[in-house]
């Protein structure tokens, strides 16, 4: 239980770092796109403006789903270990905003539910 709690705290810390990096990247992309639209509209070719529009829309999409992006980055780049894999498998992107002990109980509940569903699925087959 202590190992799981420390793993959750490590994952939350790392996810907060990824969230901050993603937030800075998305906001700077939107800012640069806005500057390009305001200052260089008449100078740039239409294809380049369309590309800048698509990039800025992706950045805004990223800002809307910031927790999900930071969770996926954390899953991909966090050092793998048995405990971290277990915690990442049963956690959700929104868990970063919750207390570590509450997250631990949620992870246990999700794991039990997935085992129950798997058992029911096996019995149905």
Image (spheres, rainbow, N blue to C red):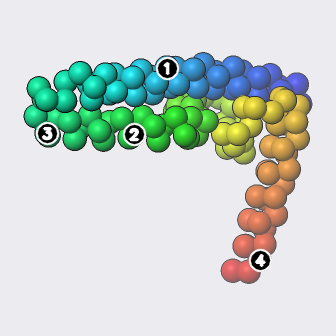
- Say which residue label 1 marks: 24
Reading the chain from its start, which is encountered first: label 4 or label 1?
Answer: 1
Quarter of the view holding residue 124: bottom right
Neighbour tally class for label 2: few under 14, some 14-19, many 20 plus, Cα within 10 Å: some
Q: Residue at 32% of width from left, 27% of height from top? A: 33
Q: CA distance from mark 2 to mark 3?
A: 18 Å
Q: Which residue is mark 4?
A: 123
> On residue 120, which mark appears?
none
Q: Secondary structure at mark 3?
A: helix
The mark that comes first in sequence, 4 or 2, is 2
Q: Earlier in the sequence, mark 2 or mark 1?
A: 1
Q: Quadrant of the N terminus?
A: top right
Q: Are marks 2 and 1 in contact (CB under 8 Å)?
A: no
* Disc 3 packing (10 Å; few <14; some 14–19; many ≥20): few
Q: Position of residue 62 (x, y in %)?
A: 48, 37
Q: Which residue is mark 3?
A: 46
3D distance between C-alphas at marks 4 and 1? 49 Å
Residue position marked by numbered label 2 in the rendering: 58
Q: Secondary structure at mark 2?
A: helix
């Amino acid at each position: 239980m202590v190992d799981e709690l420390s793993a959750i705290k490590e994952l939350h810390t790392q996810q907060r770092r990824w969230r901050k990096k993603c937030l800075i990247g998305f906001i700077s992309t939107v800012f640069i796109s806005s500057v390009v639209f305001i200052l260089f509209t008449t100078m740039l070719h239409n294809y380049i403006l369309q590309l800048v529009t698509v990039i800025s829309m992706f950045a805004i999409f990223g800002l809307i789903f910031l927790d999900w992006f930071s969770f996926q980055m954390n899953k991909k780049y966090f050092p793998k270990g048995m405990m971290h894999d277990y915690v990442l498998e049963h956690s959700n992107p929104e868990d970063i905003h919750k207390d570590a002990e509450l997250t631990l109980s949620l992870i246990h509940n999700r794991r039990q539910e997935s085992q129950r569903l798997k058992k029911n699925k096996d019995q149905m087959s």
